[in-house]
Structures are given as C-alpha cells and as structure tokens.
Image (spheres, grey):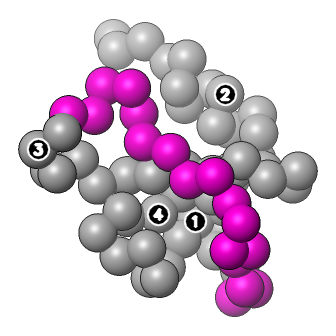
C-alpha cells in the first residue's frame, strides 16, 4: 500500500539480477525495516509501493505455473 510519507534518501535501491544493461527494465526495490518499497526506475522521484517482507519473499520465490 502506498503511503504519502517521504522516502529516506539513503535507501539502497536495487534492480533484479535478471535485469539487463539496455535500460528497458524499470523496477527497483529497497528494503526497509517495515517492508520493501518498489518503484519505477525511470521515475525515481515518482510514486512507490510498499509491501511487507512476507509478500516480497513470496513474490520473488514464486514459480511460474
């Protein structure tokens, strides 16, 4: 859920290891004590979404069916 709170500027935003170098990948994430923030890397000052650590873990470990 997005909350209109300022995002700390010292977060370590990262892209997936599957992202290429051709700038077409556009999702970044940053871990916080309260969960994980997700944003569009092409709009770093734009909106972001916060999810729980549990939701993030389930997302990154999910297998396609």
What residue does disc 3 label?
A: 22
Q: Position of residue 38 (x, y in %)?
A: 53, 57
Secondary structure under tag 4 reads: strand
- Find residue 2 and report its image quarter: bottom right
SS class, disc 1: strand
Q: Say which residue label 2 marks.
A: 57
Mark 4 is surrounded, within 10 Å at the Cα level, by few (under 14), some (14 to 19) or many (20 or more) other residues, namely some
The answer to whether marks 2 and 4 mark residues whose Cβ atoms lie closer than 8 Å is no
Dot 2, how many residues are within 10 Å of its Cα: few (below 14), some (14-19), or many (20+)? Answer: few
Distance between mark 3 and mark 4 Cα atoms: 18 Å
Pointers 3 and 1 in contact (CB under 8 A)?
no
Give the vertical position of 34 relative to 55 (above or below). Answer: below
Q: Secondary structure at mark 3?
A: loop
- Left or right relative to 65: residue 6: right
- Residue at 57%, 65% (x, y): give it: 49
Q: Earlier in the sequence, mark 4 or mark 1?
A: 4
Sequence-wise first label, 3 or 4: 3
Q: Are marks 4 and 1 in contact (CB under 8 Å)?
A: yes
Query: Percent x, y for residue 57?
Result: 66, 28
Residue designated by label 1: 49
Tell me the SS state at disc 2.
Answer: helix
Residue denoted by label 4 = 39
Give the mark, 3 or 1, whose residue is nearer the N terminus.
Answer: 3
Image coords of residue 17 (percent x, y): 39, 26
Give, as a single range, the part of the protein colored magenta: 4-20
Choose between 64 and 44: the one closer to the eye. 44
**Vertical position of residue 2 compared to residue 65: above or below:** below
Q: Position of residue 12 (x, y in %)?
A: 63, 52
Q: Nearer the viewer, mark 3 or mark 1?
A: 3
């Amino acid at each position: 859920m997005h909350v209109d709170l300022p995002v700390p500027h010292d977060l370590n935003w990262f892209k997936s290891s599957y992202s290429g170098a051709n700038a077409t990948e556009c999702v970044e994430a940053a871990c916080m004590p309260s969960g994980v923030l997700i944003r569009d890397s092409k709009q770093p000052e734009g909106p972001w979404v916060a999810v729980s650590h549990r939701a993030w873990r389930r997302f990154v470990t999910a297998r396609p069916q």
